[in-house]
Every structure is written in structure tokens, then in C-alpha cells.
Amino acid sequence: MNPYMNEDIMWQRLKDIQLEAENRRLYGPRNLPALVALAGVLGRRVWWLAGLATRRAQRRRPLQVVEQDCDAASDVA
């Protein structure tokens, strides 16, 4: 077995990894706005579904204020 074969394979792998990292650096920002837009759409849907899932209490009727006759209270005394 050739003792230098593993070094040659590892060197080729290192160059491939560096090339892949460079390609991701160059082409990565193009996909970023699409991912941000997708995250926004998914966030709005989750917010909407969460709003549908919450149960709301029934609206209360406003309290009716009953005016008391002050003269009737003085008549009792």
C-alpha cells in the first residue's frame, strides 16, 4: 500500500471542501431573501392560526346605572 495515497486523497478532499465553502459564500446571499420571505409567510400563518385557536370570552353587557330617587329615601325616615 502506498503510504502517500491517503495524503493525496485528503488533499483533494480539502480542496473540495474549500471550493464548496467558496461557492456557498458566493451564492448564499441570493437565497437569503427568499428564506426571509418564507419565514415571514410562515410566521403570519402561525399567528393567524394561533388567533383562531384562542377562545375568547363573551362580551359583557355594559352595566346599567339605575338612578335612585333621593326623595323616596327621605320619606322612609
Image (cartoon, rainbow, N blue to C red):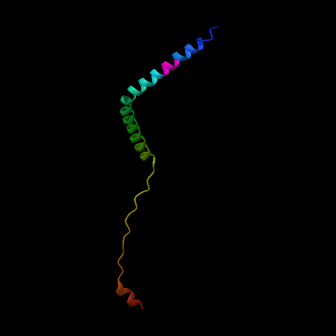
Query: Looking at the image, which residue is at 45% across and 49% down?
Result: 54
65 up-or-down from 35: above or below: below
Q: Nearer the viewer, residue 66 or 1?
A: 1
Quarter in which the C terminus is drawn: bottom left
Identity of the residue furthest to the top in this view: 1
Residue 65: percent from left, percent from top: 36, 73
Q: Nearer the viewer, residue 54 or 31?
A: 31
Taking the magenta stretch, the answer to whether it contains residue 23 is no
Residue farthest to the bottom, as pictured? 77
Q: Main SS type for the magenta part?
A: helix
Residue drawn at 39 percent across, 41 percent down: 44
The region drawn magenta spans 13-17
Apparent side of residue 6 relative to residue 25 in the rendered image (left or right):
right
Q: Quadrant of residue 32?
A: top left
Residue 58 position in % (x across, y down): 42, 57
User: How many numbered marks does the figure carry?
Assistant: 0
Nearest the camera: 12 or 61?
12
Residue at image position (36%, 80%) is: 68
* Horizontal and vertical percent position of residue 46: 43, 41
Q: Position of residue 19 (x, y in %)?
A: 45, 21
Compared to residue 27, the image places residue 4 above or below, namely above
- Vertical relation: 18 (above or below) 29: above
Dividing the picture into quadrants, the one containing residue 52 is top left
Quarter in which the N terminus is drawn: top right
Horizontal side of 13 relative to 39 (left or right) equals right
